[in-house]
Structure formats: C-alpha cells, structure tokens
Image (cartoon, grey):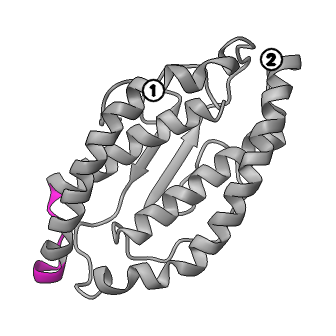
Amino acid sequence: MGSAYPVSLELDAPLEVARWRPLVHWLLSIPYYIVLYVLQLALGVVTFVAWFAILFTANIPEGMFDFMVSVHRFQWRYSSYLLWLREPYPPFEVTGPPIDAGADAPTRFSVERPQRLSRLLIFVKWLLAIPHEIVLFFLLIGAVVAILIGFFAVLITGRWPQGLRDYIVGVHRWAYRVQAYVYLLTDVYPPFRLEP
C-alpha cells in the first residue's frame, strides 16, 4: 500500500479526457448506480452483522470484510467514472481481496485487514467521526466548485487541471478513510489530510 494509513485510495488515469465525456458520463453511469444502490443496501446489513461479530469476537469474518471492502471499491470506481476522472468503464466486479491488486488499473482502493478490532470503539466511531464530517462538509463544497471548473476545462481543453483533479481525489480519499472507519473496517483514526 502507498501510505502508512491502512486505507488507501488512488487514481492513475491520464489528465486528458475526451471532451464529450463530461456531457454523458452521468448517463452512462446509471446502470452502475443501480447495482451500487443494491450493494449499499447489502453493505448496511453486512455492517450490522459485523457490529455483532466485533462485539463477540473482536473481528469481522474474512468473507464479510472482503465484501465490505469490495463495495467501497465499487463505489470509488463509480464516483471516478461519474466525475469523468477516468475514461474506461469500470468493471461490474464486487469480489476481490481487501488489498487491491490494481486489476482495474485507473482506480485502486485497499484496506489492510486488522488482526483485531476494538469492542468498545464500535459504540462511538460514529461520534468520533463528527469532526471529520464537519471538515468534509466544507471540503465537499470546494470539490463541487472544482468539479464545475473541471467540467468546463475538460469541455474546452480536453484535459483536467492537475491541481483540481488532485483536490477532488484527495477529498474522496479523506471521505473514504472516514467511511471505512465508521463502517468498522479499521480502528485507526483517520488523518486530517488529503494526501496519501
């Protein structure tokens, strides 16, 4: 993994994007969204069961953990395609190990499986995440502005401005770290940073 934090999110796509993509990616991503919606419902159920598994065993069964990570990976692939950060259509794949081997080359999302999880933290992780949620609220406002600027930049020049794209990926990275924490995948408190 590329960072010391146990949750990693990366994008390795060229800055050049076909000019028509910002106009139609939202439409092309609808089938992916439908599958993601169903997966998120399943993730809610699996997370509920995982809460009890942690309470009684201090761990999440391997298959459940892998599924939970795979749904978050699927969500990152969807977001990166919807926001035309990548050109190739993401695979409809929900299986795979928690450490992303890079099968879907432009995007990677990995979570290191912990040896043991805290039985006490499951009661307060949502509460501990509130400072992150407040900061993310303002970062997401900035991300919306960056996406609007990026829309016109790609439409006119066929290229993402490097800084804007890095900021959007950084906000996603921060949000997914918090999400992995709240969804019980790690006990390591997320850092307040956009970088890996």
Q: Position of residue 81 (x, y in %)?
A: 43, 70
Residue sitting farthest toward the right: 56
Q: Nearer the viewer, residue 2 or 76?
A: 76
Instruction: Measure the C-alpha gap from mark 2 to mark 1.
Output: 24 Å
Left or right of residue 166: residue 79: right
Left or right of residue 8: residue 162: left
What residue is drawn where x is 55% and y is 58%? Answer: 75
| Numbered-mark total | 2
Q: Which residue is mark 2?
A: 58
What residue is drawn where x is 26% and y is 58%? Answer: 144
CB under 8 Å between discs 2 and 1 = no
Q: Which residue is mark 1?
A: 130
Q: Element type at marker 2?
A: loop
Residue 79 occupies which quadrant of the picture? bottom left
Q: Nearer the viewer, residue 145 or 164?
A: 145
Q: Nearer the viewer, residue 135 or 106?
A: 135
What is the magenta range? 155-162
Quadrant including the C terminus = top left
Can the viewer see residue 19?
Answer: yes
> Which label sits in the foreground, 2 or 1?
1
Q: Element type at marker 1?
A: helix
Left or right of residue 33: residue 45: right
Would residue 18 be counted in the magenta stretch?
Answer: no
Would residue 160 be counted in the magenta stretch?
Answer: yes
- For badge 2, the amino acid type reads Ala
What residue is drawn where x is 33% and y is 41%? Answer: 137
Q: Position of residue 63 (x, y in %)?
A: 83, 43
Residue 146 occupies which quadrant of the picture? bottom left
